[in-house]
Amino acid sequence: MSEAATYLVTGGMGCIGAWALRELVRRGDRAVNFDASADRHRLDWLMSRDEQARITFVQGDLRDEGAVKAVFAEQGITHVIHLAALQVPMCRANPLLGAQVNVAGTVNVFEAARENGIGHIAYASSIGVYGPPSDFPPGLIANDAPQQPRTLYGAYKVCNEQTARVYFHDHGISSACLRPYTVYGVGRDQGMTSEPTHALVAAVKGNAYRIGFCGTMQFHFAADVARQFILAAETALDGAYGYNLGGQPHSVEQFAGIARKLLPDAQIEVADVALPFPAGFDDSELRARFATVYETPLDEGIAATIEHVRRLGDAI
C-alpha cells in the first residue's frame, strides 16, 4: 500500500487483532489500535516492544461514539479492520452490554467511516450467525444459508451484517465481513473454541489437557485469519458481503492426534460432547472474490504454534 495508508484495527488486543497488528508492522504499514484494554500480553507474545512502538495505541470504548469518531479523524484512517467484540460467554452473561459493544459499537464504526469519507470496511462476523446442524442438510453449509443463530452473540453478528447492507444502500459504504470457525494459534487464549490452543500450550509445557468438546470443524491458523482481514480491508467491493472462511474440515481428535505426533509425550484427551455447530461451511464465495485465500495446512499450523510456544517459554 502507499505510505499514506493508515490501518485502524479495533480490538487489537485480542487474538486476531494482535496478529493483524503484527502483520501490518512487519509489512511497514502504519497501524492504529483502538481498544478498551491496555493489556498487551498477546502483543508481547507476537512481537517485540520495539515493534510495538511503531503502533499508535488509542485506548477507548467502542460504545463511545465521540471517541470512535475522533480516532478516525485525528489519525487519518484510510483502512478499517473492525474486530472488537464481546464473545459468546460475555454476551450471555450480560446481554445489554453485549448489544452495546457488538451492535451499537459497530454502528459507531460505520458512522465514523461515513463522516470521514471512508468507502469500505472489513469486519468480523462469525459462523455463529447460522444455526445448529439440524437446521441444514448434510454437507458444507452454503454462504447464503438461512441465518438462525441460537446465541445472542450470533444474533448480534446477524444484526451487524444487516447494518452493513443498509450502510451500502444508504451511503455507498461497501464492506466485507469474514466468518471464522475455530481459530487457533498463539494468542487464542479465550473464547468458546480456544481449547485446542490451550491444549497445545499445555502439551509443550508437559501438562495434561482435556479438550472439552469433540466433533468436526474448520480450523483457521490465526496468522491466516489476520492476513485475510487485511486483504479484505484493501479490497473495495460493489456491495456489503459476508464470506465463510471455510477450508478443509477436521475433527478435534485429528487436531489432537497431530499434536501427539509432534509431541510424543503430549497428554491430550478429547471429550465426547460435540459443539452445536455444523461441521463446515462452504468458502467458494471467498475464493471467487479474493485473489488470495490464506490457508496454512493444519499440521503446519500446529507445528508453527508448538515452536512459537517453545520460543516463548515461561512468558506464556
Image (tube, grey):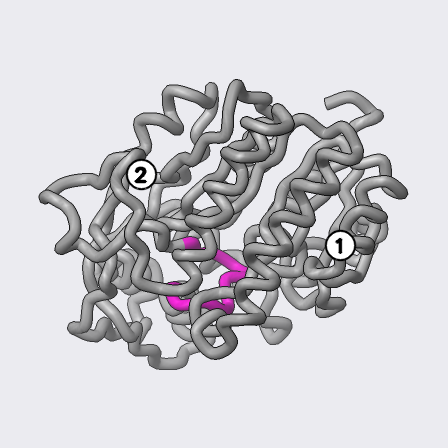
Label 1: which residue?
A: 65
Q: Which residues are magenta?
A: 183-193
| Residue 316 location (% of width, % of height) | 58, 71
Magenta stretch containing residue 189, yes or no?
yes
SS at badge 1: helix
The quadrant holding residue 35 is bottom right
**What amino acid type should be assigned to the residue bearing mark 1?**
Glu
Q: Position of residue 201 (x, y in %)?
A: 46, 69
Q: Residue at x 69, y 58 (%)?
A: 62
In the picture, measured across the screen, residue 285 lies left or right of residue 307, that is: left
- Element class at badge 2: loop
- Quarter of the image with the N terminus is top right
Closer to the chain start, of discs 2 and 1, is: 1
Mark nearer the viewer, 2 or 1: 1
The residue carrying mark 2 is 247
Q: Amino acid at mark 2?
A: Gly
Q: Residue at x 45, y 31 (%)?
A: 241
